[in-house]
Image: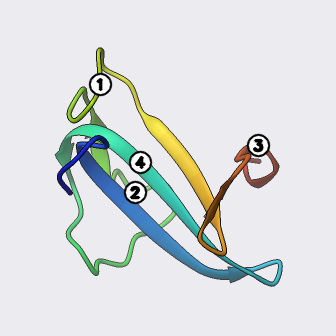
Amino acid sequence: MPGGYGNRVVISHGKMKGSKIASTYSHNSSLKVRSGSRVKQGQVIASSGTTGASTGCHLHFEIMQNGSYVNPMPWIS
């Protein structure tokens, strides 16, 4: 995906806790999945990098709830 996020993976988790949930993983150096792929817990989906509007190698992780970005901490176990 072009733009500020660089190489980006967006995973749709469907409905959870009554809300549509997606997670995003951005600035990757390479992607290990293709659009439309089903992924499993623990599967490698990308290699961290510094693509897009980035000044150093890192993972930009976000959670979207019903299309809005939310604090990811409640979703991480």
Local crowd at mark 2 within 10 Å, few (<14), some, or many (≥20)? few
Q: Nearer the viewer, residue 53 or 48?
A: 53
The image quadrant that residue 68 belongs to is bottom right
Distance between the Cα atoms at labels 3 and 2? 21 Å
Distance between the Cα atoms at labels 1 and 3? 23 Å
Distance between the Cα atoms at labels 3 and 4? 15 Å
> How many numbered callouts?
4
Instruction: Tell me what residue is drawn at x 36 percent, y 43 percent.
Output: 26
Instruction: Tell me what residue is drawn at x 30 percent, y 52 percent.
Output: 8
Give how far across and how far down residue 71 sits, in percent: 74, 46
The image quadrant that residue 16 belongs to is bottom right
What residue would you read off at disc 2?
43
Q: Quadrant of the N terminus?
A: bottom left
What residue would you read off at disc 4?
25
What residue would you read off at disc 1?
54
Q: Earlier in the sequence, mark 3 or mark 4?
A: 4
Tag in front: 1 or 2 = 1
- Amino acid type, mark 3: Met
Tag in front: 3 or 2 = 3
**For the residue labelled by badge 1, is the local secondary structure a helix, a strand or a loop?**
loop
Q: Is residue 44 left or right of residue 52?
A: right
Q: Is residue 32 left or right of residue 73?
A: left
Q: Earlier in the sequence, mark 4 or mark 2?
A: 4
Local crowd at mark 4 within 10 Å, few (<14), some, or many (≥20)? many
Tag in front: 4 or 2 = 4
